[in-house]
Amino acid sequence: MKISDQQLSAFIDNELSASEAEAVRSAIAEDETLCDRLAALSMVDHYVKQAAEEATRQPMPDRITALFEEPAEQPSSKVVAFPAGARRHRVFSGLALAASVALIALVGVKIAPVGESNANDQWAAVSDVLDTQLSGGVYQAGGQVVRPQLAFYNHQGQFCRQLERETSGNREALIACKTNDQWQIKAQQPIEADATNGGEYQTASAGKPLTSKLDEMIEGAPLNRTQEQQAIENQWLNNVTQGVDNE
């Protein structure tokens, strides 16, 4: 949805209907440049109003007062009423930057830093693999290599998965559990490349990745392939797989 400066100005002045205002908020949430434009318009409007208030506190010159007392015989010019948005046409980047923080609160939009946003996108890609793929495979996910290794129940009855993730030359072992319909990282450990072993990766500490943490968290035996498939089909929502015998 394309939002014009006139619509943003009307949004600032609370001149939009409830549905139109909600449409503007949604557009701002999807396009960070709209927040900058809104910030600039709001700040310029502030200074316009401030200047107007200063002007009204000054006595009106006699030559201006006379114009209201004596009707003009012929209008010398045509008065054009500009919409509120026209006052704000000239904006400065410095004003936009200064107002951005305040306007985030105004429109109710939280904009994550770029690094945080990228990390969230990467984990969303990993979560999709955990939701849909069996252990033992190697999967590409948003520029990452994901290797699910096993699935299990923790002591709280939640589904958990042990996996490895490789991205940008870095590799790590993870344990993630399904909490509130989201895969949340519960433990992680870097896996370092061993220059003395042909560049093969090995964990930063002795033994298999996160072995002690896995032993601490797991309840019973890991899920077998049939149980994992059932969990995937049920979107990892409940413990229906506990009734299936291990292969």
Image: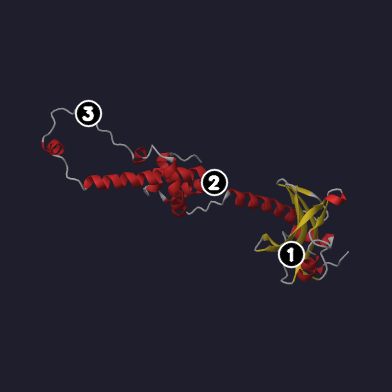
Q: Which mark is residue 30?
A: 2
Answer whether residue 97 is visible to the viewer in this image: yes
Q: In terms of secondary structure, where does tag 3 sit?
A: loop
Mark with earlier residue (1, 2)? 2
Which residue is found at the position 35% from the left and 47% from the top? Answer: 46
Residue beneath disc 3: 77
Count the marks.
Answer: 3
Confirm or deny contact between disc 1 and disc 2 (CB under 8 A): no
Q: Amino acid at mark 1?
A: Phe
Q: Amino acid at mark 3?
A: Ser
C-alpha distance separating marks 1 and 3: 77 Å
Q: Amino acid at mark 2?
A: Glu
Residue 111, percent across and down? 53, 51
Q: Which mark is residue 159?
A: 1
Determine which quarter of the picture holds residue 235: bottom right
Confirm or deny contact between disc 2 and disc 3 (CB under 8 A): no
**Figure check: 239 above or below 192:** below
Mark with earlier residue (2, 3)? 2
Determine which quarter of the picture holds residue 212: bottom right
C-alpha distance separating marks 1 and 2: 33 Å
Determine which quarter of the picture holds residue 158: bottom right
Residue closest to the far left: 70
Q: In terms of secondary structure, where does tag 1 sit?
A: strand
Which residue is found at the position 15% from the left and 40% from the top? Answer: 61
Quarter of the picture holding the C terminus: bottom right
C-alpha distance separating marks 2 and 3: 45 Å
Q: In terms of secondary structure, where does tag 2 sit?
A: helix
Which residue is found at the position 34% from the left and 45% from the top? Answer: 47
Residue 22, percent across and down? 47, 50
Q: Residues within 10 Å of mark 1 (few under 14, many from 20)?
A: many
Residue 95, percent across and down? 41, 44
Q: Residues within 10 Å of mark 2 (few under 14, many from 20)?
A: few
